[in-house]
Amino acid sequence: LDSDDTGKEVEETKYRGIIRSLLYLAKSRPNIMFSVCICIRYQSALKESHMKVVKKILKYLKGTLNAGLWYHKGTSPSLIGFSDSNFASCKLDRKSTSGTCHVFGECIVS
């Protein structure tokens, strides 16, 4: 996702309302936090391509409504964390990005 200077403009109110709801939801669904924060960057210059990305996030969430974590009773779970970072990888503003992943037992939890 990047700035789209030639795209068709969209209604800001609808986009910002969806983003606000996604931010609220991201508190309990950290798997969408990075994508939502990328979409927030373009609130001042909205184009149709940005709205398509937000709709893809909503479609992803709809497909994961019945997803959950299952823990086996006989295993002793352990928590393992991984992290990664990328120095100045954003093409637009050369900002760095980082991410983490935590595994509890055999399930990825964040």
Image (cartoon, rainbow, N blue to C red):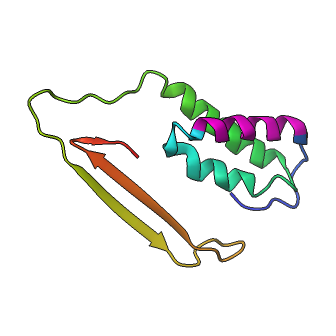
Residue 20, by quadrant, is top right
Query: Front-most of 108 and 73?
Result: 73
Q: What is the x, y in percent for residue 51?
A: 77, 42
Q: Which residues are magenta?
A: 13-25
Answer with left or right where residue 57 lies relative to residue 79. right
Q: Relative to residue 68, is residue 85 depicted above or below? A: below
Q: What is the x, y in percent for residue 1?
A: 68, 57
- Residue at the location (80% across, 35% down)? 17
Residue 72, by quadrant, is top left
Secondary structure that dominates the magenta span = helix
Answer with left or right where residue 24 lies relative to residue 47. left
Q: What is the x, y in percent for residue 50?
A: 76, 48
Q: What is the x, y in percent for residue 53?
A: 68, 44
- Residue at the location (78% across, 62% down)? 3
Q: Relative to residue 33, is residue 69 depicted above or below? A: above
In the current view of this chain or complex, which residue is farthest to the top?
66
- Residue at the location (81% across, 41% down)? 16
